[in-house]
Image (tube, coloured by chain):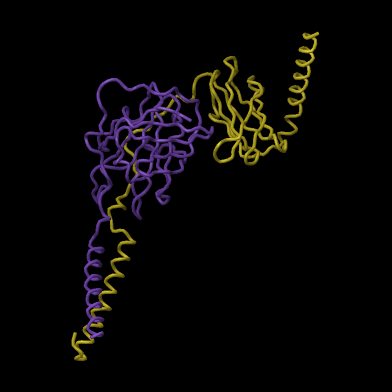
Amino acid sequence: MRRVVGDTVIASVTAVALCSGVWLLHGGAGTQAPPQPSAAEARPGGADPRSAPALPPSPPDRVRIPSIRVDAPLMGLGLTTSGSLDVPPAAKKNLAGWYESGTTPGETGTAIVAGHVDNAEGPAVFYDLGAVRRGATIEVDRRDGGVAVFTVDAVEVYDARDFPDEKVYGAAARPELRVITCGGEYSRATGYRGNVVVFAHLTGSR
Amino acid sequence: MRRTAARLLTGTALAVVTAAGFAAPVQAAVARSGSLDVYPSTAVPGGQVTVNTAACGDPGAAAGDASAVGAGPFTLAPSSHDGKAIGQFRVPPSAQPGTYEIVAQCAADGRRVAGDLVVVLTSSREQVYPRGSVKTGVGGALGPDPVQTAAGVTALAVAAAGGTWLLHRRARGDGI
Protein backbone atom coordinates (compact mmCIF):
# COMPACT_ATOMS: atom_id res chain seq x y z
CA MET A 1 0.00 0.00 0.00
CA ARG A 2 2.75 2.42 1.01
CA ARG A 3 4.62 1.49 -2.18
CA VAL A 4 1.58 2.30 -4.34
CA VAL A 5 1.32 5.76 -2.71
CA GLY A 6 5.06 6.30 -3.24
CA ASP A 7 4.79 5.33 -6.88
CA THR A 8 1.85 7.65 -7.40
CA VAL A 9 3.81 10.57 -5.90
CA ILE A 10 6.83 9.82 -8.10
CA ALA A 11 4.63 9.49 -11.18
CA SER A 12 2.98 12.86 -10.43
CA VAL A 13 6.30 14.60 -9.79
CA THR A 14 7.64 13.15 -13.04
CA ALA A 15 4.63 14.38 -15.00
CA VAL A 16 4.77 17.88 -13.48
CA ALA A 17 8.55 18.13 -14.01
CA LEU A 18 8.17 17.02 -17.63
CA CYS A 19 5.46 19.56 -18.39
CA SER A 20 7.17 22.49 -16.65
CA GLY A 21 10.55 21.59 -18.16
CA VAL A 22 9.10 21.62 -21.67
CA TRP A 23 7.23 24.87 -20.95
CA LEU A 24 10.33 26.59 -19.54
CA LEU A 25 12.56 25.54 -22.42
CA HIS A 26 9.90 26.41 -24.95
CA GLY A 27 9.96 30.03 -23.87
CA GLY A 28 7.65 30.29 -20.89
CA ALA A 29 6.55 33.80 -20.03
CA GLY A 30 9.93 35.53 -20.11
CA THR A 31 10.61 36.17 -23.78
CA GLN A 32 8.26 39.04 -24.47
CA ALA A 33 9.52 42.08 -26.33
CA PRO A 34 10.02 45.18 -24.16
CA PRO A 35 6.84 47.24 -23.65
CA GLN A 36 6.07 49.87 -26.29
CA PRO A 37 4.08 53.05 -25.67
CA SER A 38 0.52 53.26 -26.92
CA ALA A 39 -0.69 56.10 -29.15
CA ALA A 40 -2.39 57.60 -26.08
CA GLU A 41 1.03 58.52 -24.67
CA ALA A 42 1.96 60.60 -27.73
CA ARG A 43 2.52 64.34 -27.45
CA PRO A 44 -0.75 66.25 -27.05
CA GLY A 45 -1.39 69.35 -29.09
CA GLY A 46 -1.74 72.83 -27.64
CA ALA A 47 0.53 74.97 -25.51
CA ASP A 48 3.23 73.44 -23.37
CA PRO A 49 2.34 73.44 -19.68
CA ARG A 50 4.29 75.78 -17.47
CA SER A 51 7.59 74.62 -16.05
CA ALA A 52 9.39 75.21 -12.77
CA PRO A 53 12.16 77.88 -12.70
CA ALA A 54 15.39 76.66 -14.30
CA LEU A 55 18.24 75.48 -12.07
CA PRO A 56 21.89 76.52 -12.42
CA PRO A 57 24.04 74.09 -14.42
CA SER A 58 25.22 71.08 -12.44
CA PRO A 59 26.10 67.67 -13.83
CA PRO A 60 23.74 64.81 -12.91
CA ASP A 61 24.73 61.73 -10.88
CA ARG A 62 21.62 59.50 -10.89
CA VAL A 63 18.27 59.08 -12.60
CA ARG A 64 15.15 57.62 -11.01
CA ILE A 65 11.84 56.69 -12.65
CA PRO A 66 9.79 55.31 -9.74
CA SER A 67 6.86 54.10 -11.89
CA ILE A 68 9.09 51.56 -13.66
CA ARG A 69 11.46 51.01 -10.71
CA VAL A 70 14.49 52.59 -12.40
CA ASP A 71 17.27 53.89 -10.10
CA ALA A 72 20.54 54.08 -11.99
CA PRO A 73 23.85 55.96 -11.91
CA LEU A 74 24.63 58.23 -14.86
CA MET A 75 27.90 58.41 -16.81
CA GLY A 76 28.93 61.15 -19.22
CA LEU A 77 28.33 60.41 -22.93
CA GLY A 78 29.84 61.98 -26.02
CA LEU A 79 29.12 61.53 -29.71
CA THR A 80 30.17 58.73 -32.04
CA THR A 81 32.13 59.50 -35.20
CA SER A 82 28.85 59.52 -37.12
CA GLY A 83 27.46 62.22 -34.83
CA SER A 84 24.99 60.00 -33.02
CA LEU A 85 24.83 59.89 -29.25
CA ASP A 86 27.24 57.36 -27.75
CA VAL A 87 25.90 54.80 -25.27
CA PRO A 88 27.09 53.36 -21.94
CA PRO A 89 28.98 50.03 -22.00
CA ALA A 90 26.37 47.33 -22.68
CA ALA A 91 27.80 44.94 -20.09
CA LYS A 92 26.71 47.21 -17.23
CA LYS A 93 22.99 46.62 -17.32
CA ASN A 94 22.00 49.17 -14.65
CA LEU A 95 24.02 52.08 -16.03
CA ALA A 96 22.54 55.00 -17.95
CA GLY A 97 24.31 58.02 -19.46
CA TRP A 98 23.76 61.69 -20.19
CA TYR A 99 25.04 63.85 -23.04
CA GLU A 100 27.71 65.83 -21.21
CA SER A 101 28.42 68.35 -23.96
CA GLY A 102 24.80 69.37 -23.80
CA THR A 103 22.42 70.83 -21.25
CA THR A 104 22.56 69.56 -17.66
CA PRO A 105 19.19 68.27 -16.36
CA GLY A 106 17.34 71.16 -14.70
CA GLU A 107 19.07 73.88 -16.72
CA THR A 108 17.18 75.69 -19.51
CA GLY A 109 17.42 73.61 -22.68
CA THR A 110 17.14 69.96 -23.63
CA ALA A 111 19.04 67.50 -21.44
CA ILE A 112 19.50 64.02 -22.86
CA VAL A 113 19.67 60.72 -20.97
CA ALA A 114 20.12 57.36 -22.72
CA GLY A 115 20.41 53.75 -21.65
CA HIS A 116 20.09 50.22 -22.93
CA VAL A 117 16.78 48.38 -23.26
CA ASP A 118 18.66 45.08 -23.14
CA ASN A 119 22.09 43.55 -23.58
CA ALA A 120 23.27 40.09 -24.61
CA GLU A 121 22.26 38.67 -21.22
CA GLY A 122 18.74 40.08 -21.06
CA PRO A 123 16.80 43.18 -19.96
CA ALA A 124 18.79 46.31 -19.04
CA VAL A 125 18.16 49.62 -17.27
CA PHE A 126 15.47 51.04 -19.59
CA TYR A 127 13.73 47.76 -20.50
CA ASP A 128 10.40 49.14 -19.23
CA LEU A 129 10.83 52.70 -20.59
CA GLY A 130 8.05 52.11 -23.14
CA ALA A 131 5.64 51.50 -20.24
CA VAL A 132 6.11 55.02 -18.81
CA ARG A 133 2.87 57.01 -18.89
CA ARG A 134 2.22 60.70 -19.38
CA GLY A 135 2.35 62.50 -16.01
CA ALA A 136 4.92 60.09 -14.53
CA THR A 137 7.79 61.53 -12.49
CA ILE A 138 11.49 61.38 -13.37
CA GLU A 139 14.02 62.51 -10.76
CA VAL A 140 17.64 63.42 -11.41
CA ASP A 141 20.18 63.75 -8.57
CA ARG A 142 22.57 66.59 -9.32
CA ARG A 143 26.14 67.06 -8.15
CA ASP A 144 25.18 70.32 -6.43
CA GLY A 145 23.17 68.22 -3.99
CA GLY A 146 19.79 69.09 -5.48
CA VAL A 147 17.20 66.91 -7.18
CA ALA A 148 15.56 68.01 -10.44
CA VAL A 149 12.01 66.69 -10.75
CA PHE A 150 10.56 66.24 -14.24
CA THR A 151 7.06 65.32 -15.37
CA VAL A 152 6.54 63.21 -18.50
CA ASP A 153 4.75 65.00 -21.38
CA ALA A 154 4.84 62.23 -23.97
CA VAL A 155 6.30 58.84 -24.83
CA GLU A 156 6.96 58.19 -28.52
CA VAL A 157 8.56 55.56 -30.76
CA TYR A 158 10.59 56.75 -33.76
CA ASP A 159 11.97 54.72 -36.63
CA ALA A 160 15.77 55.04 -37.00
CA ARG A 161 15.39 55.77 -40.73
CA ASP A 162 13.25 58.82 -40.07
CA PHE A 163 14.49 60.09 -36.74
CA PRO A 164 13.20 63.58 -35.77
CA ASP A 165 16.52 65.05 -34.58
CA GLU A 166 15.18 68.55 -33.97
CA LYS A 167 12.21 67.35 -31.94
CA VAL A 168 14.28 64.99 -29.80
CA TYR A 169 17.57 66.86 -29.38
CA GLY A 170 16.77 70.45 -30.40
CA ALA A 171 16.95 73.52 -28.14
CA ALA A 172 14.12 74.31 -25.73
CA ALA A 173 13.17 77.56 -24.01
CA ARG A 174 12.48 75.81 -20.71
CA PRO A 175 14.26 73.01 -18.80
CA GLU A 176 13.40 69.76 -20.61
CA LEU A 177 14.59 66.18 -20.46
CA ARG A 178 14.64 63.33 -22.98
CA VAL A 179 15.13 59.72 -21.92
CA ILE A 180 16.01 57.44 -24.83
CA THR A 181 16.33 53.70 -25.34
CA CYS A 182 15.94 51.22 -28.19
CA GLY A 183 12.47 50.29 -29.30
CA GLY A 184 10.13 49.54 -32.13
CA GLU A 185 10.04 46.26 -33.99
CA TYR A 186 12.93 43.88 -33.55
CA SER A 187 14.45 41.63 -36.17
CA ARG A 188 17.39 39.33 -35.73
CA ALA A 189 19.08 40.81 -38.80
CA THR A 190 18.76 44.52 -38.09
CA GLY A 191 18.05 44.73 -34.36
CA TYR A 192 15.53 47.22 -33.01
CA ARG A 193 13.97 49.44 -35.68
CA GLY A 194 14.28 52.68 -33.70
CA ASN A 195 14.03 54.35 -30.31
CA VAL A 196 11.54 54.92 -27.52
CA VAL A 197 11.82 58.57 -26.45
CA VAL A 198 10.33 59.98 -23.24
CA PHE A 199 9.72 63.75 -23.31
CA ALA A 200 9.60 65.50 -19.93
CA HIS A 201 9.90 69.00 -18.51
CA LEU A 202 11.02 70.38 -15.14
CA THR A 203 8.18 70.73 -12.64
CA GLY A 204 10.08 71.06 -9.39
CA SER A 205 13.30 70.69 -7.47
CA ARG A 206 14.42 70.01 -3.95
CA MET B 1 35.30 105.95 14.40
CA ARG B 2 33.02 103.51 12.68
CA ARG B 3 34.54 104.50 9.37
CA THR B 4 38.01 103.87 10.76
CA ALA B 5 36.96 100.40 11.91
CA ALA B 6 35.50 99.65 8.48
CA ARG B 7 38.68 100.87 6.84
CA LEU B 8 40.73 98.73 9.19
CA LEU B 9 38.61 95.70 8.32
CA THR B 10 38.94 96.36 4.60
CA GLY B 11 42.65 96.72 5.00
CA THR B 12 42.90 93.43 6.86
CA ALA B 13 40.78 91.68 4.27
CA LEU B 14 42.98 93.06 1.50
CA ALA B 15 46.10 91.95 3.34
CA VAL B 16 44.66 88.44 3.73
CA VAL B 17 43.68 88.26 0.07
CA THR B 18 47.09 89.57 -0.98
CA ALA B 19 48.86 87.10 1.29
CA ALA B 20 46.70 84.30 -0.12
CA GLY B 21 47.59 85.52 -3.60
CA PHE B 22 51.32 85.33 -2.89
CA ALA B 23 51.03 82.04 -1.04
CA ALA B 24 48.96 80.46 -3.79
CA PRO B 25 51.77 79.59 -6.25
CA VAL B 26 53.75 77.90 -3.48
CA GLN B 27 50.78 75.94 -2.19
CA ALA B 28 49.55 75.09 -5.67
CA ALA B 29 52.49 72.74 -5.99
CA VAL B 30 51.20 70.63 -3.11
CA ALA B 31 47.50 70.91 -3.99
CA ARG B 32 46.18 67.67 -5.38
CA SER B 33 45.58 68.38 -9.02
CA GLY B 34 42.05 67.99 -10.29
CA SER B 35 40.65 67.48 -6.82
CA LEU B 36 38.38 70.51 -7.22
CA ASP B 37 35.82 69.82 -9.95
CA VAL B 38 34.77 72.99 -11.77
CA TYR B 39 31.57 72.80 -13.81
CA PRO B 40 31.27 73.98 -16.45
CA SER B 41 35.04 74.16 -16.85
CA THR B 42 34.54 76.76 -19.59
CA ALA B 43 32.20 79.64 -18.78
CA VAL B 44 31.20 83.01 -20.17
CA PRO B 45 31.20 86.30 -18.19
CA GLY B 46 28.02 86.37 -16.12
CA GLY B 47 27.74 82.60 -16.13
CA GLN B 48 27.16 80.50 -13.04
CA VAL B 49 29.80 77.95 -12.02
CA THR B 50 29.45 75.00 -9.65
CA VAL B 51 32.50 73.52 -7.91
CA ASN B 52 32.70 70.43 -5.78
CA THR B 53 35.34 68.38 -4.04
CA ALA B 54 35.49 65.09 -2.18
CA ALA B 55 38.86 66.03 -0.66
CA CYS B 56 37.41 67.52 2.52
CA GLY B 57 36.04 64.31 4.00
CA ASP B 58 32.46 63.36 4.67
CA PRO B 59 30.77 65.63 5.53
CA GLY B 60 33.21 68.40 4.73
CA ALA B 61 32.75 72.12 4.30
CA ALA B 62 35.30 74.36 2.61
CA ALA B 63 36.06 78.01 1.95
CA GLY B 64 36.16 78.72 -1.77
CA ASP B 65 38.06 81.52 -3.43
CA ALA B 66 37.29 82.67 -6.96
CA SER B 67 38.99 86.04 -6.62
CA ALA B 68 41.39 85.09 -9.42
CA VAL B 69 38.47 85.60 -11.82
CA GLY B 70 37.12 88.50 -9.74
CA ALA B 71 34.26 86.64 -8.09
CA GLY B 72 35.67 86.68 -4.55
CA PRO B 73 35.15 84.19 -1.73
CA PHE B 74 32.29 81.69 -1.62
CA THR B 75 31.29 78.79 0.60
CA LEU B 76 31.35 75.08 -0.19
CA ALA B 77 28.70 73.39 1.95
CA PRO B 78 28.52 69.64 2.62
CA SER B 79 26.23 67.96 0.08
CA SER B 80 23.22 65.92 1.13
CA HIS B 81 24.47 63.01 -0.94
CA ASP B 82 27.84 61.40 -1.63
CA GLY B 83 29.62 63.51 1.00
CA LYS B 84 31.05 66.16 -1.31
CA ALA B 85 31.45 69.83 -0.48
CA ILE B 86 29.67 71.94 -3.07
CA GLY B 87 29.60 75.64 -3.82
CA GLN B 88 28.66 78.08 -6.56
CA PHE B 89 29.75 81.47 -7.77
CA ARG B 90 29.00 83.73 -10.70
CA VAL B 91 31.69 84.84 -13.13
CA PRO B 92 31.67 88.67 -13.07
CA PRO B 93 30.25 90.20 -16.27
CA SER B 94 33.53 92.13 -16.58
CA ALA B 95 35.74 89.00 -16.50
CA GLN B 96 38.37 88.78 -19.22
CA PRO B 97 39.03 85.63 -21.27
CA GLY B 98 41.71 83.39 -19.79
CA THR B 99 42.38 80.50 -17.47
CA TYR B 100 41.87 81.12 -13.77
CA GLU B 101 42.67 78.97 -10.76
CA ILE B 102 39.74 78.42 -8.43
CA VAL B 103 40.76 77.23 -4.98
CA ALA B 104 39.06 75.84 -1.91
CA GLN B 105 40.39 75.20 1.56
CA CYS B 106 38.85 72.43 3.67
CA ALA B 107 37.38 73.73 6.93
CA ALA B 108 38.48 70.67 8.88
CA ASP B 109 42.15 70.20 8.03
CA GLY B 110 43.03 73.24 5.94
CA ARG B 111 43.85 71.11 2.91
CA ARG B 112 43.88 73.18 -0.25
CA VAL B 113 42.45 71.96 -3.55
CA ALA B 114 42.36 73.73 -6.87
CA GLY B 115 40.78 73.52 -10.30
CA ASP B 116 40.93 75.55 -13.49
CA LEU B 117 38.18 77.71 -14.94
CA VAL B 118 38.46 78.92 -18.53
CA VAL B 119 36.60 82.13 -19.34
CA VAL B 120 35.68 82.74 -22.97
CA LEU B 121 33.74 85.63 -24.46
CA THR B 122 31.43 83.69 -26.75
CA SER B 123 29.77 80.63 -25.41
CA SER B 124 31.76 77.59 -26.37
CA ARG B 125 28.77 75.73 -25.04
CA GLU B 126 27.36 76.49 -28.46
CA GLN B 127 25.82 73.09 -28.54
CA VAL B 128 26.53 70.34 -30.98
CA TYR B 129 23.37 68.30 -31.01
CA PRO B 130 23.45 64.54 -31.49
CA ARG B 131 22.00 63.18 -34.71
CA GLY B 132 19.96 60.11 -35.43
CA SER B 133 18.86 57.13 -33.42
CA VAL B 134 20.71 55.58 -30.49
CA LYS B 135 21.99 51.99 -30.44
CA THR B 136 20.78 50.88 -27.05
CA GLY B 137 19.71 47.29 -27.52
CA VAL B 138 20.73 44.03 -29.10
CA GLY B 139 17.62 41.96 -28.56
CA GLY B 140 19.09 40.06 -25.64
CA ALA B 141 15.83 40.37 -23.74
CA LEU B 142 14.08 38.50 -26.53
CA GLY B 143 16.22 35.37 -26.41
CA PRO B 144 15.90 32.62 -23.86
CA ASP B 145 16.56 33.66 -20.29
CA PRO B 146 19.55 31.67 -18.98
CA VAL B 147 17.95 31.19 -15.55
CA GLN B 148 14.78 29.92 -17.18
CA THR B 149 16.76 27.59 -19.43
CA ALA B 150 18.60 26.16 -16.42
CA ALA B 151 15.30 25.66 -14.57
CA GLY B 152 13.85 23.89 -17.61
CA VAL B 153 16.83 21.56 -17.93
CA THR B 154 16.67 20.76 -14.20
CA ALA B 155 12.96 20.00 -14.43
CA LEU B 156 13.52 17.68 -17.41
CA ALA B 157 16.34 15.92 -15.52
CA VAL B 158 13.96 15.31 -12.59
CA ALA B 159 11.33 13.99 -15.03
CA ALA B 160 13.90 11.67 -16.64
CA ALA B 161 15.02 10.33 -13.25
CA GLY B 162 11.42 9.73 -12.15
CA GLY B 163 10.53 8.08 -15.45
CA THR B 164 13.57 5.81 -15.35
CA TRP B 165 12.78 4.74 -11.82
CA LEU B 166 9.15 3.94 -12.68
CA LEU B 167 10.12 1.98 -15.81
CA HIS B 168 12.70 0.09 -13.82
CA ARG B 169 10.06 -0.87 -11.25
CA ARG B 170 7.69 -2.03 -13.95
CA ALA B 171 10.44 -4.09 -15.68
CA ARG B 172 11.06 -5.85 -12.36
CA GLY B 173 7.39 -6.74 -12.36
CA ASP B 174 6.59 -4.89 -9.12
CA GLY B 175 3.63 -3.27 -10.80
CA ILE B 176 2.56 0.34 -10.33
Question: In the rendered view of the protein, which quadrant contains the N terminus of chain B?
Answer: top right
Where is B46 relative to B75, above or below?
A: above
Write the residue at 58% across / 26% down: B88
Q: Is residue A183 left or right of residue B86?
A: left
Residue A154 drawn at (x, y percent): 29, 32
- Image label count: 0
The percent coordinates of residue B171 (x first, y second) are 20, 89
Q: Which chain is purple?
A: A
Where does residue B111 sit, x and y in percent of width and height? 71, 37
State the image quarter where residue B77 is shown.
top right
Q: Quadrant of residue A14?
A: bottom left
The C terminus of chain B, quarter of image: bottom left
B167 lies above or below A92? below
x, y (%) of residue B76?
62, 30
For the point 40% across and 42% down, the residue is A87
Find the residue positioned furthest to the front: A1
Question: Residue at the location (24% across, 50% down)?
Answer: A189
Left or right: where B139 falls relative to A147: left
Q: Nearer the viewer, residue B4 or B146?
A: B4
Judge whether A4 appears above or below A14 on screen: below
Q: Which chain is yellow?
A: B
